[in-house]
Amino acid sequence: MTIALYANEVVTKAGNAQYLNIDNQVKGKLILTNQRLYFKQLADKVNGLNIEIEPKEIRELMYFKTRMIFQNGLSLITKEGKELKFIVKDRDSWSQMINRMC
């Protein structure tokens, strides 16, 4: 799995993740670079889910639990009020790195 990087863009963290939306969970990779946060769906579909978030678009990061006990949820609130929910391993590390980028 690859993404097209911009000029002077470097990947700082990448890992498996799931994007949660109203209908289902989408498995993919969450990729943090020095310029953006990117989610790419694992399954190669014609209209695969790809989400790109620039640091200036992020208003707030929040944690949530999955299945009431697992502390692995990371929620990004955009300045437009949209909530993007991800299940990640080591959400504290993700949160710290995203905060440094913003």
Image (tube, rainbow, N blue to C red):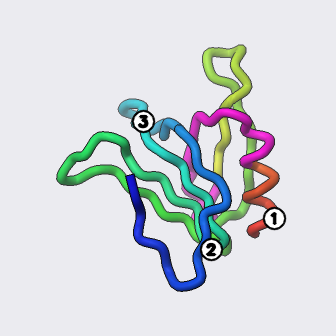
Query: How many numbered circles are shown?
Result: 3
Give the alpha-carbon distance from disc 3 to disc 1, as whole Å: 26 Å
Magenta region includes residue 89? yes
Q: Which residue is mark 3?
A: 27
Upstream in sequence: badge 2 or badge 1: 2
What amino acid type should be assigned to the residue bearing mark 3? Answer: Lys
Magenta-colored span: 77-94
Helix or strand or loop: what does disc 2 sit on?
Answer: loop
Residue 92 shown left or right of residue 45 in the figure: right
Q: Is residue 65 above or below residue 17?
A: above
Q: Nearer the viewer, residue 41 or 5?
A: 5
Q: Residue at x 61, y 59 (%)?
A: 32
Alpha carbon of mark 3 to alpha carbon of mark 2: how far?
A: 23 Å
Tell me the crowding category of disc 2: few under 14, some 14 to 19, or many 20 or more residues within 10 angstroms, Cα based. Answer: many
Give the residue drawn at x 58%, y 76%: 9
Q: Secondary structure at mark 1?
A: helix
Residue at image mark 2: 35
Residue 55 lies, in percent from the top left, at: 66, 70
